[in-house]
Amino acid sequence: MASPAEYQLDDIDRRIIAALKADGRATNQRIARSLRISPATVGARIRRLENMEAMRVVAVTDFAALGLRVLLAIGIEVQGRPSEEVARELATLPEVFAVHLVTGARDIEILVALRDLDQLEGFLLRDVARIRGIRTLSAGVAADVIKYDFDRAHIA
């Protein structure tokens, strides 16, 4: 089997991906009908794309639909402990939906979703404060979401 670096997506692959992006629950039969190919071909191509890790079919959470109205970006400076250890511990907090080891003024950036601002104090004082190695926090509350595009991989 060709590796992702060796295999070039063709028009059928791109159209299958586009169909699944439009409706992740689309059946092979429905995709096949729209592309005028066999359902077996659709299934085989989806398996190949998934095996090559060129595509995954996933569900994406809508924060607002879950009642999560406060989004925060928190920059964290670490001291006295490896940043990766602190990051892994932060990743266990249910309110945290992304953890990044970063370069620059901070060591870690986390993205957090809360129901309302009343949860913020408890999250910071109860959950984050118990994690050893955090020197400073710098939090920013999202005032408005201008763009939220989960699908950033461009299909060439």
Image (tube, rainbow, N blue to C red):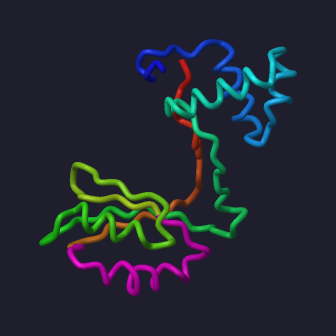
Q: Is residue 111 left or right of residue 19?
A: left
The stretch of residues the image draws in magenta is 112-134
Q: Identify whether 24 is placed above or below 128.
A: above
Horizontal side of residue 132 vs 58, given as left or right = left
Q: Is residue 44 left or right of residue 107?
A: right
Which quadrant of the figure has residue 80?
Answer: bottom left
Total marks in image = 0
Identify the residue at horizontal 48%, vertical 65% (top origin): 112
Q: Which image quarter holds the C terminus?
A: top right
Furthest residue in direction left, as rendered: 80
Residue 21: x %, y % from top left: 69, 35
Residue 28 position in % (x across, y down): 79, 31
Image position, residue 58 (x, y; %): 63, 46
x, y percent for residue 41: 73, 20
Is residue 118 highlighted in magenta?
Answer: yes
Name the residue located 45 percent from the left edge and 60 percent from the top edge: 111
Left or right: 67, with 148 as reference point = right
Q: Residue at x 22, y 50 (%)?
A: 104
Identify whether 85 is placed above or below 39.
Answer: below
Q: Is residue 50 magenta?
A: no
User: In front here: 19 or 64?
Assistant: 19
Residue 13 placement: quadrant: top right
Who's the residue at 61% across and 12% down the image?
10
